Image: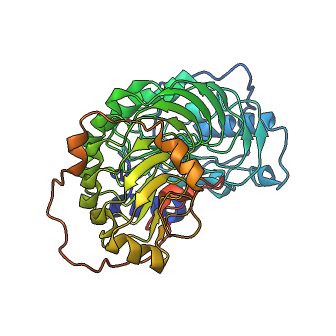
Amino acid sequence: MYQMGSISSNNRSIFHISILFLPCFTCLASCQDFQGLSPLISPPLIPEILNLLDQRLALVYPIIQGFKNTITSDPLNITQTWVGADICNYKGFYCSSPPDNNSAITLASIDFNGFQLSAPTLDGFIDQLPDLALFHANSNKFSGTISPKITKLPFLYELDISNNNFFGSFPVEVLGIPALSFLDIRFNFFTGTVPPQVFTQRLDVLFLNNNNFMQGLPENLGSTPVLYLTLAYNKFIGPIPRSILNASATLTEVLFSHNLLTGCLPYELGFLRKLVLFDASNNFLTGPLPCSLGCLAKLEQFNLASNLLYGQVPEVVCALGKLVNLSLSSNYFTKLGPKCTKLERSGVLDIRKNCIPDLPGQRSARECAAFSLHRRYCSNPASFNFIPCQVPSSSHPRIGTKRNLVGYSALLRQAVEFPGRN
């Protein structure tokens, strides 16, 4: 198999580089089980004058040319380079040796990011490239559905079709891709529900944001092994499942913002010890902040703005040593302790539009009184005061160093860049 592993591993970085730079070698290899094409594509025969470097490249040549004939718009003239026998020098195509034959050369990676190509479907294209390991097509105008034949690609581990025109229900076909560890379908027009099986897939990255999924967060949410989970800008409803505790070994960045989530924050969030980013802003979450959040020692960005939260902001949260941004604006908090006051004065804590007396920029007394008449209640209130870890004893919270985080990059339309993968 190609060098695969977690998204942050050196092996994957080395493999990605090898795809871009390994030279082509001459050899013969056989490839079976990839016969037949979509009826939408009628590929040309391979001209006799072409001297393709490898039988595997000869196999994919008509596939590429057939796909080229379906492209309806190419404003950057990308396909003008898709001519002749040197497939490895076609713009967007990268070759390497396949895992099952180190002496062969094959098409291993496709990177169409930002090409602005238009085509009615990808069926008969990526599903017919037997050695494909990566397919990135951010910011194009591809549409249609994903072919079930994509499950026959044994080496495909990164699939990025973000910022395109795909529509319909969640593409369940991707769940059958045996080696998939990176799935990015954000900024499309998918609707309906996300199958619960998604959260049991062996993924490192799951970006579903900016679609139109409408459902409650599944109870098996915590079964996911992902590092990066982005569900923002959909219509997820209901509470954050307590099962999120089960993702404590891997979950690093979580974006639930701009949905319709309700209920109280679960105490179990405090067990996500690897968490660096958590954003559940612009929902309808309520209740006090659990003191267990003070155990999130690696937390840098914490955004709960524009919810219905209330009570005192826990001092243990304000004492977190790596916080760069704590956004609690547009809630109904009523009290800050000395550590939180210090954090507010430093600019790390944004507490505007709350109900804290004698602090500028707060809600009106009338608005706060109206909210208190209809206060929401949480089950098991005793859990909000329990701290399942030893917190720092310092009375002077440190301020972390600001850096770019992967999750927030996913809220932009362009391709997401991961540190160490270029």
Horizontally, residue 167 falls left or right of residue 193, namely right
Residue at x-position 77% and y-position 45%:
117
- Please, which residue is most extreme toward the top here? 39
Residue at image location 46% in from the left, 35% down from the top: 262
- Image quadrant where residue 119 sits: top right
Residue at horizontal 54 percent and vertical 42 percent from the top: 370
Q: Position of residue 56 (x, y in %)?
A: 53, 41
Q: Quarter of the image containing the N terminus?
A: top left
Residue 273 on image: x %, y %: 25, 56
Question: Can see residue 336?
Answer: yes
Total marks shown come to 0
**Which residue occupies 71% across, 32% down?**
143
Is any atom of residue 183 visible in this view?
Answer: no
Viewer-closest of 116 and 370: 370
Rendering coords of residue 158 (x, y %): 48, 45
| Residue 94 sits in quarter | bottom right
State the residue in front, 92 or 315: 315
Q: From the viewer's perspective, is residue 285 above or below residue 113?
A: above
Q: Nearer the viewer, residue 27 or 252?
A: 252
Image vertical order of residue 409 relative to residue 191, above or below = below
Q: Is 196 above or below relative to 291?
A: above
Query: Within the image, what quadrant is residue 66 found in?
Result: top right
Q: Nearer the viewer, residue 401 or 19?
A: 401
In the rendered view, would you say 159 is above or below 400? above
Q: How is the image coloured?
A: rainbow
Q: Position of residue 265 (x, y in %)?
A: 36, 43
